[in-house]
Amino acid sequence: MTSIRRDVLIGLVCLALAIALPVAMPGRYVITQSTLFFIWAIVVVQWNLVLGIGGIFSLAQMALFATGAYAAAMLGFYWKVPMLAAILMAGVITVAVGMLIGLACLRLRGPYVALLTLAIAQVMYLLIVNDTDCFTTAGGCMPLFGGVRGIGQFGDIGLRALFPSKWYIAHYYVGLALLAVAVTISIVVIRGPLGLAFRALRDNPGYAMSRGISRFKYQLWIFAVSAFFTGIAGGFYAVHFRVVGPTVFSFSTLLFLIAMIVVGGLGSIWGPLLGAAVLMLADEGMRELSDYRNIGLGLLLAVFVIAWPNGLNGWLQRSRASRN
């Protein structure tokens, strides 16, 4: 079985199981946590394109996610844009921000890219939390970006009105659809000629550029694709929770998401999804142990890095090869 056929089969099986989940386990808590899983899975799948396939050590993904969330919220709050349109527009706005970050990183390599992108995210965070000037008096004096309180009351996509008691199930299927599209794009990129170009630039940039592969064009392209879906995920996050604030820049969340990629398998198609599922289940299992939660997650990550440096996906591939 070819790689693309295997990926399609795995994707269809996972999609069928996810579609059936609300029927098999209709509890609200399970559904809402699964919706959050879809949102984080979109982020890590797209981050994996930049970090694992492109070899660009960007830590700007949460800044892009926050850009999408704030853009959707502000479009709805200030200009009363319908939220479906606002989410799509947030994706486009995030692409513009992502390409600016990509341009800033073109002359940098390795840890310098990580430092620059992290600095950009922190500057955005500080600008928001330190903005205390009154921009609007709607609901009291509020800064342009909502300050530390954030922005709320910007509307939703209408599913709460259509399904008053089951809106969370409708949101579940919206999140699933967005994840399915994001994973499909990831498969197309990784398995296609673009994936070969990205891996060439990652593994041997000098040789790749000598063969006519433009680092400028491909780096901006992968930043744009990743930023679009990350911004869409941020917009849907804002709509789902009906509020967006500076907590979306949380450094602990950034580390949590990058750990998903490491645990699942950097540079693979299904690794980020596996890692997201494992870490969210582990995080949920340690929820009652609030004092030791971060310690437990850190130990889990250390075990994976030492015992399975290629992540769960690499371990599964080795197990399948040994059986053959």
Image (tube, rainbow, N blue to C red):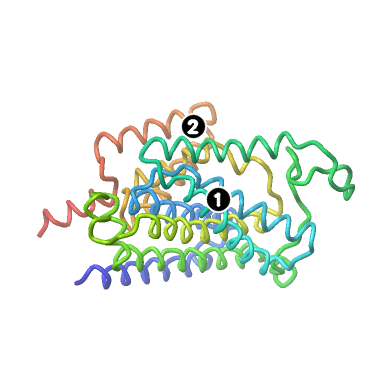
**How many numbered discs, if any?**
2
- In the image, which is nearer the foreground, mark 1 or mark 2? 1
| Residue appearing at x 61%, y 59% in the figure | 93
Between residue 287 and residue 310, name the one nearer to us: 310
Q: Is disc 1 in contact with disc 2, using a CB cutoff of under 8 Å?
A: no
* Image coords of residue 91 (percent x, y): 58, 61
Badge 1 marks a residue whose secondary structure is helix
| Residue appearing at x 24%, y 67% in the figure | 3
Badge 2 marks a residue whose secondary structure is helix
How crowded pointer 2 is (Cα within 10 Å; few <14, some 14-19, many 20+) is rated as some
For the C terminus, the image quarter is bottom left
Q: What distance separates the C-alpha of mark 1 from that of mark 2?
A: 27 Å
For the N terminus, the image quarter is bottom left
* Residue 80 appears left or right of 27: right
How crowded pointer 1 is (Cα within 10 Å; few <14, some 14-19, many 20+) is rated as many
Q: Residue 262 carries which label?
A: none
Q: Mark 2 points at which residue?
A: 293
| Residue appearing at x 26%, y 45% in the figure | 310
Which amino acid type is marked by label 1? Answer: Leu
* Image coords of residue 87 (percent x, y): 63, 63
Whether residue 44 is situated above or below residue 166 in the rendered picture: above
Between residue 77 and residue 236, name the one nearer to us: 77
| Residue appearing at x 74%, y 46% in the figure | 145
Which amino acid type is marked by label 2? Answer: Arg
Q: Name the residue under label 1.
A: 64
Q: In which quarter of the image is residue 96?
A: bottom right
* Residue 143 appears left or right of 113: right
